[in-house]
Image: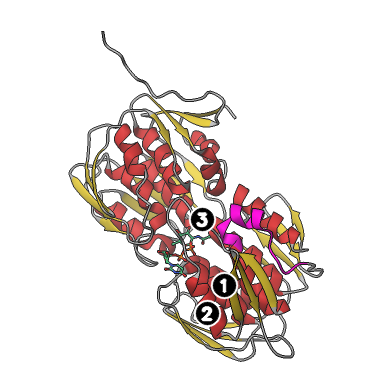
Amino acid sequence: MTVSVVPSQSVSLPQLEIAGGRRLSGEVRVSGAKNSALVLMAACLLTDDALRLRNVPPLTDIAAMGDILAALGVTVRRGDDSIDLQADRLNQTSAPYDLVNSLRASFFCIGPLLARTGIARVPLPGGCQIGTRPVVEHVKGLKALGAQVTIEHGVVSAVVPGRGHRLRGGHIHLDCPSVGATETLMMAAALADGETVITNAAQEPEVTDLARLLIAMGARIRGAGTPSITIVGVSRLHGADNAVIPDRIEAGTFLLAAAITRSTLRVAPLVPEHLGAVLTKLEQAGCRLDSDGLGMTIRADRIQAVDLRTQPFPGFPTDLQAPFMSLLATAEGNSVITENIFENRLQHVAELQRMGASIRMQGNIAFIEGVHRLSGAPVQGSDLRASAAMVVAGLAADGITTVQGLSYLDRGYADFEGKLNSIGASIRRTGG
Ligand code: UD1
């Protein structure tokens, strides 16, 4: 007797059902950058005046950040693709644990709260699926700006001593170029007394976007986008109206969706400089890329193996490592992917193996032997980008792939299946 064990999936859990093997075509629109919008929202805490952000993506993480700001007393009004924020009646300097716990990025509030009010209490964000994610650099930097910081019972309490409770400029050298620490410290230093220099700063486009907003609010900042950022503190910042940059990770995911289905697709808006390392790897893999100023057209036919290592910007972004692995699982030849940023960010390997990928792991390195075709299977996304990787793999797989773990996906991709269906995919959301 043969007994077959088929993984069962509860029909009530939300999932995407992807009928693979279809070519994509046409043009897909990229939303505003989640990671940029989240930090720009926190910047509203720096001023009494109204802040309007445009090109804000409709994502659950954005709604969660709005809830956290509202709990601090910020007036939050959501429009179609804009958000209006006004922190003229802050009534709290403590962020609520439940809300912070649901969104790591809410730790951003500590910098501007401290700079504006001289006191801030924010629960220590927990680890997450991809790794421990410490905030040592953020805390070290705030201390260098004159704050007294204690961590007790899971809460980071920061206070600026002295009359006036104003942070003072200082020199901060980051031991690692943390994106969150650079952004937190830029916001804190914007209202500090005197000059702050951050060295070994993160150079990600989201850091530059924050600097652009802060400058529009009256801050004096030089060097954002380089490893050394100088901020001359001002006593007051004012309101601004600013558009969020396009999401480079969403754009990269669509390029990979086109590549894995061997399609021709235009992805816009897309800033090529934000995706330099990814575009280089796609070209090395055999894709043709043509930039037209606003967008990028990708033409993919045969895909060759390539090796890549994740690194801080301008290196290859960790957030596109998982979907790039889906592509390489179907490439001709053997590829090696090394994950250098987060210690637990290769959980999608096991799921890709369930779809027929041939991948061997050794620590933080994945050795991928390309296969002719992946086969559809029930799979689970273990974090935001791993979920996207599963969808990308499902687009090219034989038969039906069902992807669970959509709460992750909805945190970072606006109407992912709607956008993919509009360019020829066949994806259905069921359950939930
Ligand atoms: C941001 C992005 C996230 C992206 C990551 C790396 C947001 C909301 N999230 O996260 O999507 O994957 O950048 O590009 O913008 N580290 C320390 N000590 C610290 C802080 C960080 O060792 O005090 C290490 C981390 O463990 C990790 C690396 O630095 O290995 C990068 O972390 P960081 O740049 O801080 O990432 P986030 O800002 O949390």
Q: Which residue is mark 3?
A: 247
Which of the two labelled residues, at mark 3 and mark 2, occupies the earlier sequence position? Answer: 2
For the residues labelled 1 and 2, the Cα–Cα distance comes to 9 Å
Q: Which residue is mark 2?
A: 141
For the residues labelled 1 and 3, the Cα–Cα distance comes to 20 Å
Where is residue 173, by image quadrant? bottom left
Q: Which residue is mark 1?
A: 184
The magenta segment is 92-106
Is 218 left or right of 133, judged from the image as shown? right
Which of the two labelled residues, at mark 1 and mark 2, occupies the earlier sequence position? Answer: 2
Q: Quadrant of the C terminus?
A: top right
User: Is 178 drawn above or below residue 279 in the view shown?
Assistant: below
Q: Which secondary structure, mark 3?
A: loop
Coordinates of residue 395 in the picture (x, y in percent):
39, 34
Q: Local crowd at mark 2 within 10 Å, few (<14), some, or many (≥20)?
A: many
Q: Which residue is at a point 48% across and 50% down the rendered structure image?
A: 250
Contact between labelled residues 2 and 1, with CB atoms less than 8 Å apart: yes
Task: Tell us which disc is closer to us: 3 or 2.
Answer: 2
The secondary structure that dominates the magenta segment is: helix
Can residue 278 be seen?
yes
Q: Which residue is at a point 56% across and 77% down the rendered structure image?
A: 186
Residue extending furthest toward the right: 89
Residue behind label 3 places its C-beta within 8 angstroms of ligand 1: no
Query: Residue 362 versus residue 16: which sits nearer the camera?
Result: 362
Task: Tell us which disc is closer to us: 1 or 3.
Answer: 1
Q: Local crowd at mark 3 within 10 Å, few (<14), some, or many (≥20)?
A: many
Coordinates of residue 373 in the picture (x, y in percent):
27, 31
Is 355 left or right of 304, judged from the image as shown? right
Query: Residue 370 versus residue 80: which sits nearer the camera?
Result: 370
Q: Local crowd at mark 1 within 10 Å, few (<14), some, or many (≥20)?
A: many
Which of the two labelled residues, at mark 1 and mark 3, occupies the earlier sequence position? Answer: 1
